[in-house]
Amino acid sequence: MKLLNVFISGMILILLITWNSCRYNDSNVKPEELQLNLRWSKGYPGETKENIITGLAWTFSFLGAELPKGSLETAIQWSDSMNIFVDIKKLGFNQNAEVAFRNLIAVIKNSQEYIIFDGIDIGRFVMLTLTNTNHYYAITGAKKTYQRFKAGYNFDQKKAAILTSTIAFGNRLIEISEGNKFTEFAFIAMEGKGSIPDSTFKIKEFEVMDFMKNGQLRFALYDSTGKLKIAASPELTAAGKPTKCLWCHETSLIPPFNDDHTLTGYYSTVEFKNKLDERMSLIQVHRSSLNSDVDFSKKQDHTKAELLYLSFMEPSAERLAAEWNMTIVEVNEKLKEIPTHPHHEFLYLGSKLYFRKDVEKFTPYESIQVPEDPRNYSANERDFTEP
């Protein structure tokens, strides 16, 4: 019996060592597993190499990269006039983000596009990282549940009531965390049905926001049970996906525009705006102290990241010709039955653009499918960050 107990104890020890070893190996990302090539297919006439680097810098920053001063020069390098080598390891991501990138990059390198061209289109890469909600959550480290998110902060008992919102289609409640440092700042927007003044408001889902170490906003969406959601419910709000939150907020805490009231038991509109101003002042101080390649004072630079996915999702014939390695004549012949349109947001992207969903089937090689919409709910948001 004694020998049997020794044997069992020994086996348990071996299993524990093996299990811990597997866990260690899973998080021990090799440098080459975080390296990949991106290929540039010029999206619009005025797009430059500088635009591309700025766009990539903000893409990675939105995903949580700290981008220490000088890291861009060593981490993102032009291999030639159309191809870029990226070393994720040098961008200042945490270990969990590196694991998520490692798993995603493995899938990317297995795609026919990557094998043929030794790289993936920059726009497709941004769509697979920043605008794919599952991947955004994994890379930025969004909490798995609403309960875990809320437990991480000390929220004020008093809430702000938004009665007239530019985002929600009805009333919404805002919870504000207490604290004096940017790491203590968080917000919860509760969407629902009914009236706050009439005490009939019923919470249906949660939109949360806090700050990452690099000073960027981080967004997450949860359903009424506390589970992560791809996008906010369109019958309740126009908030869409985290990408749309980023597009709307940019780098700021946005005050209510149309609301102006004083409701007993809640912060008034003026009080709520003052709280946002106080927090933004402290956040700006933190951002100015960062030794980073992202300059928050250049407020329009983030647009270069948005243009990377917008020009991919609504490409011109010229962009597709470069992307597909064809002539413009060949592209026009392939797409002669497909209608074109001007871009609704940035006219300089072109007046004869296609929707990606209409032309993807004509791609002469297999690529990883991207979300159908970069900012709103898409049914095809797969998760490649899990092994």
Image (spheres, grey):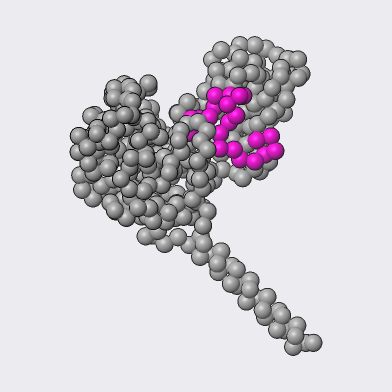
- The quadrant the N terminus occupies is bottom right
Camera-nearest residue between 35 and 210: 35
Camera-nearest residue between 364 and 307: 364
- Quarter holding residue 258: top right
Q: Is 52 positioned to the left or the right of 183 in the image? A: left
What kind of secondary structure does the magenta stretch mostly adopt?
loop
The correct choice, above or below, for 127 with respect to 37 in the image is above
Q: Is 380 positioned to the left or the right of 155 in the image? A: left
Camera-nearest residue between 317 and 109: 317
Residue 235 colored in magenta in the image: yes
Q: Residue at x 28, y 41 (%)?
A: 323
Q: Residue at x 69, y 22 (%)?
A: 193
Residue lying furthest right in this view? 1
Q: Position of residue 113 (x, y in %)?
A: 33, 50
Residue 298 visible, this orientation: no
Q: Residue at x 52, y 23 (%)?
A: 254
Q: Is 334 positioned to the left or the right of 267 in the image? A: left
Residue 44 colored in magenta in the image: no
Residue 368 visible, this orientation: yes
Q: Position of residue 150 (x, y in %)?
A: 66, 38
Residue lying furthest front in this view? 337
Q: Position of residue 248 (x, y in %)?
A: 47, 26
The correct choice, above or below, for 81 with respect to 224 in the image is below
**Which stretch appears magenta?**
223-246
Q: Residue at x 46, y 33 (%)?
A: 373
